Image (cartoon, rainbow, N blue to C red):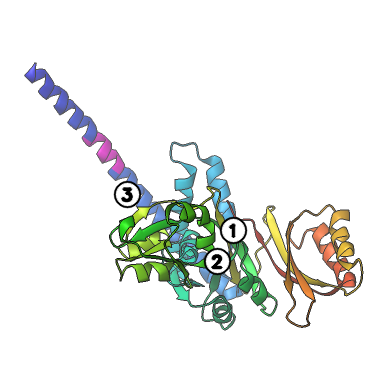
Amino acid sequence: MPDRDFFDILSDMKELDKHRINIDTIDKEILELLNKRANEAMSIGEIKKAQGQPLYVPSREKKIFERLTSINGGPFPNDALKAVYREIISASLSLEEVQKVGYLGPEGTFTNLAAMKNFGLSAELVPVRTIPEVFDNVERGRLSFGIVPVENSLEGVVNHTLDTFTTSNLKISGEIFLEVNHNLMSKTGKMSDIQRIYSHVQPLGQCRKWLAEHCPNIPLQEVDSTARAAEMASHDESTAAIASEMAAIKYSLRYVEKSIEDSSSNFTRFLIIGDFEPLPTGNDKTSIVFAAAHRAGSLYEVLSIFAKKHINMTKIESRPSRQKAWEYVFFADLDGHKNDQAINEALGELVEHTAFVKVLGSFPKGEK
């Protein structure tokens, strides 16, 4: 019996070695193909530079992901396939030119996570202090792109982002949806040590029920970011933070409780801002801002234009115009690209019924 067990083990080891040798061979082939792909990408980059075209084209990347997932026969999962190609594309872009991407900082925020998700680890991700400063740095050419939050599925729009669009010449180049998980964390990981809890205003609102039930007598204090809250908690055992998993790693914090958000369907939408507009992909969104003429029924006339042309308006928000008291501008999202016939015609008609209208961008829809 012992001899039989020994030979079985020996046979298994030989089988294991055979598969490992196969994997080594495949890895060598993958490496050769990655370098071959990188050379092709660099050639494309040289042509783009000569023609003055942008290196980063989200519509092209989306088509790559869609094509690969459509032909993937498994067992490699599609989500993992996208993640792998996200890094392949990121690394290829860095060979042509490192993409310098600004995001609403500091490091460790959800906006930081959104930037990593979209641009990959080979991009240079730069934390920026405020939303207007993100816009300003991109406009001045210090950054290739910017990432800013625009709305949360529970707390609504980010007013600073919408307001900055009214005066900026930048365009929306894409959007990113990020599932938000909030975690209560501290130096010790013990609820009994916590005397105060810090976080950004939105996470505090999104965890309201959990906090009321489990921490009813602990003061809640707002700070300018979840990462700042985590940094503060890292210096004081009596302080806790509500922040991301990334912030916990960066500031060496322990979890008191994970996923304390009140809703399991909590997403934040981020916008990629730049100085160019992507080509149509067939699954696009157009964002506009307009001011309805100051007369009765003008907003109804505007909305009727889209209704008559069967254009789906997926969102509309009003904001004070900041030009005159009690006057408002409206931000709207439309299904389709501005080059689509129906939207192009509607935008032409819109001029007659508005004090002003501005297309903020047409871009591929983000994946939720």
Secondary structure mainly formed by the magenta segment: helix
Give the residue type that dot 2 points to: Tyr
Stretch in magenta = 17-23
Q: What is the quadrant of the N terminus in the image?
A: top left
Residue 260 badge:
none
Q: Give the CA separation, mark 3 to mark 1.
A: 28 Å
Residue 28 badge:
3
- Given this view, does label 3 or label 1 mark the residue nearer the observer? 1
Tag 3–tag 1 contact (CB < 8 Å)? no
Find numbered disc 2 in the image and state the secondary structure of the residue it sits on. loop
The percent coordinates of residue 100 (x first, y second) are: 48, 73
Point 66% across, 68% down: residue: 277
Residue 153, above or below 145: above
Find numbered disc 3 in the image and state the secondary structure of the residue it sits on. helix
Q: Give the CA separation, mark 1 to mark 2.
A: 9 Å
Residue 188 image-quadrant placement: bottom left
The percent coordinates of residue 27 (x first, y second) are: 33, 47
Q: Which residue is mark 1?
A: 60
